[in-house]
Amino acid sequence: MTVHVLDDYYLAITLLITIGYQLFFFAIAFSLKFDKLTDFAGGTNFVVLAIITLAFSGTRNARQIVDSIFIMLWGARLSGFLLFRIIKTGSDDRFDDKRDHFFKFLGFWIAQMLWVWVVSLPVTILNSPKVLAFAQPAFGTGCDVAGIILFTFGLILETASDIQKYIFKSRKNDKSSICDKGFFAWTRHPNYFAEILIQFSIFMIAVAPAAYNYVMGGAFNALYASIVGPLFLTTLLMFVSGLNLQERPGAKKRYDKGQHWDQYARYLNRTSILIPFPPQLYEKLPVIVKRTIFLEFPIYVFDPAKHSDSSHVGQAEESNNNRQSGDQLV
């Protein structure tokens, strides 16, 4: 039996649960100056919302169950890996300028609330009374099959790339070394590409009742509107807290400090920023193709003549060369 709570799309109840869940962990993190719960709270919140909306729905429909399990698997894997990583590192430098400032720190948690609630929308709405008031197409439609394939590939890619990057860093004494093996030979950010695939695959399954005209009116519009979830995550990764904070700033740091710059410049030229592609072919593509089809927008590109503090470059490179020469003498 479907449970009706506050509204017929479960929007209000999931928002309230998310706010309460995040504020609970925020209180602990701020009071104890404890970094180890932040990403864990984000990932597990997805699991909580999926479990609650699926339980409230009272449905035994395979589509609702599978899509709910998919977002639970993704959230649990994400929170588990990030918790493991922060336990190893001990602290999160993202919060060095926020940890002791109530409102700055709270701002991050508010952003995390928005992230969880919006990205959960496809599963939230799929499990809602408004959608389940209509007959559902049998599980196994083209949308379902495509979604399962994309999700499986995305989860394997994200898990494997996280493991590859962790092993690479743990085995290297030089932390500025370039990870250009495995999936990182085909894309500089395989984990971001995988996350985008996963969220669109979850939406693809969720939208099936509307795509095959089983639901009408507001439910039809709501299922299609839930694409805001994967679009929101894609926007975050590309323009807010992902590529824009890593690409140009990361290249500038390497150039200014003389950290394997020549090798890294070659890596940038040969390796797609997001969409996996053979490096032997990518390096031969015209710049216009890289900037458009492969999404390597100018905001990500580092130009030493424009973006570097050139007065420090020579000193950094000389220092790096001297260190390498000293290592050879030893």
Image (tube, grey):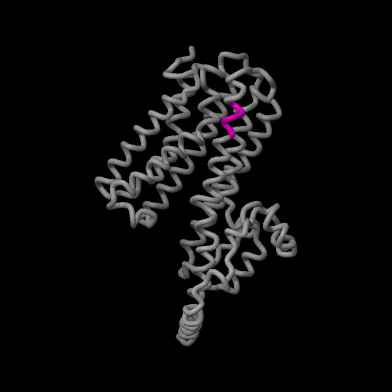
Q: Position of residue 208 (x, y in %)?
A: 65, 26
Q: Position of residue 322 (x, y in %)?
A: 47, 84
Taking the image as shown, residue 62 lies to the left or right of residue 7, namely right
In terms of depth relative to the viewer, which is nearer, 198 or 231? 231
For the image shown, how many numbered marks are present on the structure? 0
Quadrant of the drawing holding the C terminus = bottom left
Q: Report the magenta residues as a range.
A: 223-227
**Residue drawn at the location 71% of the way across and 62% of the way down:** 287
Q: Quadrant of residue 188?
A: bottom right
Taking the image as shown, residue 204 lies to the left or right of residue 240, namely right
**Residue drawn at the location 45% of the way across and 29% of the way down:** 49
Q: Is residue 92 magenta?
A: no
Taking the image as shown, residue 166 lies to the left or right of residue 286, namely left
Main SS, magenta residues: helix
Q: Is residue 94 above or below residue 201?
A: below
**Residue drawn at the location 64% of the way across and 39% of the way down:** 150
Furthest toward the left, the residue is 31
Furthest toward the front, the residue is 306
Q: Position of residue 311 (x, y in %)?
A: 48, 79
Q: Position of residue 60 (x, y in %)?
A: 55, 18
In terms of depth relative to the viewer, which is nearer, 117 or 308? 308
